[in-house]
Structure formats: structure tokens, C-alpha cells
Amino acid sequence: MTEKSPKRLPGRPKHGNDDISIQQTIIQTASQLFMEYGYETVTLQQIGKTCSVSKPTIYYHFTSKPELFKVAFKTMLHNVSRLTSHILDQAEDLESGLVRLAEARLGNPHAEIETMLREAEPFLEPAQIQDIRNAEHQIHEVLASHFQRAMDENRLRTDDPFFLAETFSTLMLMGNREDNLHKYGSNLSLGQKLVDIFIRGAQ
Amino acid sequence: MTEKSPKRLPGRPKHGNDDISIQQTIIQTASQLFMEYGYETVTLQQIGKTCSVSKPTIYYHFTSKPELFKVAFKTMLHNVSRLTSHILDQAEDLESGLVRLAEARLGNPHAEIETMLREAEPFLEPAQIQDIRNAEHQIHEVLASHFQRAMDENRLRTDDPFFLAETFSTLMLMGNREDNLHKYGSNLSLGQKLVDIFIRGAQ
């Protein structure tokens, strides 16, 4: 791997494939470390060390730690949006789709967004915070569109579909709790129990 | 206020009233700052400055930052337990009690415990983490005992009352979200919507 200038120079060549995969590696590592240890504890040095990328290379791809945090958080939320779309579009019905989605999200829970953001907020620009919030909103848009369809078809009672989306996402924070496998056997069975409460509650 | 030795000396006099109130002030301030900014960002100096108490005085009352974090977190969770008991014991029925409890908890949400603990964990002793988890468990014991009674009286369908307690507590994390007052009008109306889903779901 060639070391590159830490500053983004005007006119530098577009990312090649290697660059893209290094960038993805940095994002993925940063995302895992930030979610695990919070914003402030994690250093760029630690991120670099974990994925064997030098600090100048990180600075070549990302202008600052807040910027990397924003990109990592947004990427994670986009992945959740895509997963949500994919699973709900493929599912036979809303309930079985939500169970599959719950199983996936409980197995790979992200840190609670508000607690993470509150900690990182002093270091972020308002536009960076807004970018993260928009990425979260996309998840709720996907969920809300499926809830709205179920309401139109009288399978759920009429309610604010975004309220249901936020409620469902909040329930997924159960995946952050310790000891779930011991208590509930599997993410699938915990997901079934949560979706059962949610669907009965929303009907 | 007299400055005292920063070390806990053997045979030092029991806390007087002033000491107790200083201790309470430190705990309350620490609790607010830790919940707002996370474990690592907050320093003992900042806690002292915020409540006009010197750092040696903090060390007189608490042996270390992890210990103060533990006591502050436990105290906050004990307050939630007491509030839960008080409100549910006084309420006419489970649903109206849960609505009042939700209104209170949504209006004064605590940071998500798992995200906070994950960040603080490298600095805490296992016994300190266990103490915090036990304090959280007490909240769930209070809730579970009320859910169990409602199941015995056939007002809720039979389920694991601790699962319902954890689910209800997780729903209260909606209080951490931004913009709730704008979206839902008041904590009371958001509480009613959440309890409505929860009770229908658990019936």
C-alpha cells in the first residue's frame, strides 16, 4: 500500500478500486469501534491500528475524526435502511417480514443513536448531525411506507406510520441488552415475541 | 464549607447533615453530566465546578471517578424504581398507572444503559458493573410484579413478566428522541400512544 498525502489536494486522481476498498475498511472499522466505545474514547490511531491503515491514509480519505464518525454512522444507518427495504419487500406479509428484520437487527444491534449523538455532539458541525439524523429518518421512511400500506389494507388500525416506525426501531434496542440469548434462546424467538406485541398493539 | 482530607481516614466521624447534602449534590450533578456527555468526557473537576465543590471534597466522598459514576448511575436507577412503585401502587388500574409512569419517564429520560455501560466498562470493576445491573433489575422487578398480578387476574395474557418489563423500559427510550414535543404534543400524549400499543400487545 502506498502512503499518500494526508491533505486532499485539488485535482488528485479519482479513487481507484484499492482506494475504495481501503476507504470501506476504514469506515467499517471506525463504525465498529465508535459503536463499541463511544465517540471520544476512540482515536484515529486506534482505528488505523485495528485495520492496519496509517493515520495519514485515514486523513487522505477523511478530513477529520468528526467527518469519519459521521460517514461511519451514516453508512451503518444506510445499511439498516437497505436491509429493511430488502427484507420487507421480499416478505410474504408484514408480520413475517418484521420477524426476519427483528432477528437481523437484534443480532447486530447499533448503539442507541441519541446516547451516541449526545456524546459526540460537542465535536460535530450541525450539518454533520443533520446528515446522521437524515440517514436515520430513511429507515423510518421505509418502515412507515410498509405500515401505511398495511393500514390502507386494514391490516393495521389507522395511526401515524412514523410513530409506529420509531416505536419499532426503539424496540430493536432490546438487542443491546446483555444476556438475551440466555433469556430468550435466540434472536429469532426474541424477535417473534417483540413483533407479536408490536403487531397486536398496532392492530 | 470546610475542606476535608481527600483520603477516607479510619475513625473519621460519621457524615453530618451537611456532608449528606454535599454528597447528594455531587451525586446529582455527576448523574446529570454523565448522562448528558458520557463517562469519559466528564471530569471530576467539571463535576466539582458545576456544583461548586472542590475536587478534594469529591475524593473525600468518593474514592474514584468509576465509583462516583457507579453511585450516580445506581442512584438514578433507584429513583426510577421508587417512582415506578409509587405510581403503580397508587394507580386505579395498570393502564392508567403505566400512562402516568410513561409521562414521568419520557419527561426525564435516562441515557440508554447499555450504550453508557459499554463506554464506561473498560474503567469499571466487574462488581461496579454488577451493582448498576442490579439497580436496573430492581426497576424490572417492580414492573414484573404488577404485570404478574394483571396476568393472574386475566387482564394480560400469560407471558414472561420480566420480558414485558424489559420491553416497557425499552419503549421508554423513546423519551430520548429529539423533537418529541413537536411530533406528539406532550409526553402525556406520547405516553398514552406507547402504553396503548404495549397494553393491546400484551393482552
Image (cartoon, coloured by chain):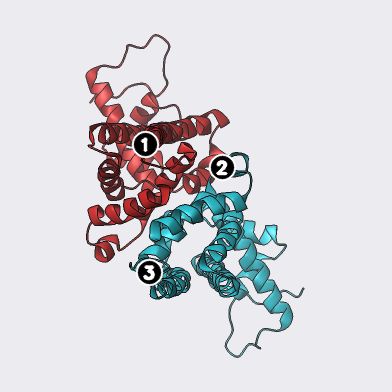
Chain colours: A red, B cyan
Secondary structure at badge 3 equals helix
Per the image, the residue denoted by label 3 is B161
State whether discs 2 and 3 lie on one chain: yes
Secondary structure at badge 2 equals loop
Q: Quadrant of the N terminus of chain B?
A: bottom right
Task: Identify whether A53 is placed above or below A5.
Answer: below
Q: Which amino acid type corresponds to the residue marked 3 in the rendered image? A: Pro
Q: Which mark is residue B178?
A: 2
Per the image, the residue denoted by label 1 is A150
Is A45 on the left or on the right of B68, as rendered?
A: left
Q: Quadrant of residue A13?
A: top left
Is B200 on the left or on the right of B3, as rendered?
A: left
C-alpha separation, residue under disc 2 versus residue under disc 3: 30 Å
Q: Residue sitting at 33 percent across and 43 percent down?
A: A32
Q: Which is nearer the eye, B15 or A144?
A: A144
Q: Residue sitting at 37 percent across and 24 percent down?
A: A60
State whether discs 1 and 2 lie on one chain: no
Q: Quadrant of residue A125?
A: top right
Comes first in the chain, label 2 or label 3: 3
User: x, y (%) of residue A38?
Assistant: 43, 48
Q: Which is nearer the eye, A140 or B30?
A: A140
Q: Residues within 10 Å of mark 1 (few under 14, many from 20)?
A: some
Identify the subunit bearing mark 3.
B
